[in-house]
Image: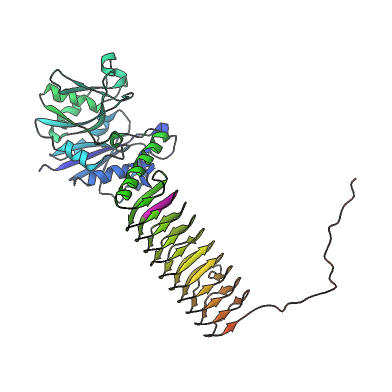
Amino acid sequence: MQELDIVILAAGKGTRMRSHIPKVLHTLAGKPMVQHVLDSAFALNPARTHVVIGHGADKLREALAESPVHFAVQAEQKGTGHAVAQALEQLGSGNVLILYGDVPLLQRESLSELLAHVDEQHMGLLTVTLDDPSGYGRIVRNAAGDAVAIVEQKDANSAQLAINECNTGIMAMTSAQLKRWLPQLSAENAQGEYYLTDVIAMAADEGIKVCTAQPATAVEVEGVNNRAQMARLERAYQQQLANQLMEQGVALADPTRLDIRGSLICGHDVFIDVGCVFEGEVELGEGVRIGSYCVIKNSTIGAESIVDTHSVIEGIVAAGFNQIGPFARLRPGTRLAVKAKVGNFVETKNADVGEGSKINHLSYVGDARLGRDVNVGAGTITCNYDGANKHHTDIGDNVFVGSNSSLVAPVTVGKGATIGAGSTIAKDVTEYALAVTRSRQIEKNEWQRPSKVIKPRL
């Protein structure tokens, strides 16, 4: 099997995006478009992958610093043929596949089919048949049906404009073929550019057969030039992910209102309501129910848990049979044991919440450990930050914390203790004790409530 070089063209500015960000770094499903292309490329196990950069070159180098790619610089954008030529000296002696950094949904299977045609007497060209071919180069075939040329729309005559088989720009050939053809390209055309597509006519002139293949769906080869196209591909990609989830048995209230920006693994009988966003790596156990408009990032939610509406969750592990929300915010380092509950308008961070423990309402629990069957009343705060450092709160099993209490860390509340409502606890509390810090109530029976002074009009 021939070794493979993949060349990805990513030097364009993307003027119609109206952005300071290089076009190929705009994200689709939370990942830069060019990274989607690289993922498909790497699935083919190439010997080398080359990214041709130009506009925003430094930003691309930084964004792809962890990827095993070689960079080639196109200082001036003089067309696709000129772009590929910048990587020519880096190519090996095997086959070459040319891709585009703004065509993010291309599948490995389509590329494998294309590469299967390539040898010294054949090259591969990916085409697509469109009802409206406007803007695309047209595939010109001879009387025998062989592809012999690609004509760009601006250079096409009326007969060629009627062709609806279009060029995707994606092609594969041997390195030797490419090295013969690229130096022969000319910029004598309406754009004044070196078209890579001109190599098709050169192949035909040499008697090399141009073998065409088509993707399973047209959206695979759709490129992005503006925000509207970006949004259309985002929805197409999300629909693919939604279909995969439903095939696995996940119930989606509305497949068109779901966003996955990473990986989502689901057990059996998971239900996801409308408007939910999943980022990073998320795993939902069997029977989990996610309410509407939740955001869940890099978290594991155990079996039979319920995440109620408008909850925001990041970097947590919930063991299972948990109740979260509505309107809860669980921040990184939160760990919920089995049957622990975090209710409405509660925020946690770096908190271990023990089995059966409850933080039901309007509380902040950070840098804390709660034992089993702890009840935290509404309005409770662990005061973990002194302005410079974070401190820990340790709450033992079966502790009851009354409403509107402040636990000033570092502090330990022994098991079975009770904190009276409205208390500020700054010292350790003994096991099974009642701790109350509350001012004495005073009444003044002859007290006169202030009245509003009414100023006369001038």
Quadrant of the image containing the N terminus: top left
Q: Nearer the viewer, residue 171 or 73?
A: 171
Tell me: 253 left or right of 374: left
Residue 330, x across and y down, in percent: 47, 62
- Give the magenta part as a residue range: 272-280
Residue 107 belongs to magenta span: no
Q: Main secondary structure of the magenta part?
A: strand
Q: Residue furthest top?
A: 158
Residue 49, image x, y percentages: 23, 43
Q: Describe residue 28's horizontal placement relative to residue 385 as left or right.
A: left
| Residue 389 in sight here | no
- Looking at the rendered image, the quarter that the C terminus falls into is top right
- Quadrant of residue 223 within the rendered picture: top left
Give residue 117's quadrant in the image: top left
Of residues 78 and 453, the one nearer the viewer is 453
Q: Is residue 159 above or below residue 424?
A: above
| Image label count | 0
Front residue of this view, candidates 398 and 49: 398
The picture places residue 336, in percent across and down from the top left corner, at 42, 68
- Side of 58 relative to 331 (left or right): left
Q: How is the image coloured?
A: rainbow
Q: Is residue 187 visible?
A: yes
Residue beneath the point at 43% across and 69% down = 339
**Residue 174 vertical position relative to residue 197 in the rendered view, above or below:** below
- Up the image or down, 223 lies above or below 339; here it is above
Position of residue 274 measured from the top left corner of the image (x, y, whole percent): 44, 49
Going 32% across and 50% down the picture, which residue do you hit? 245
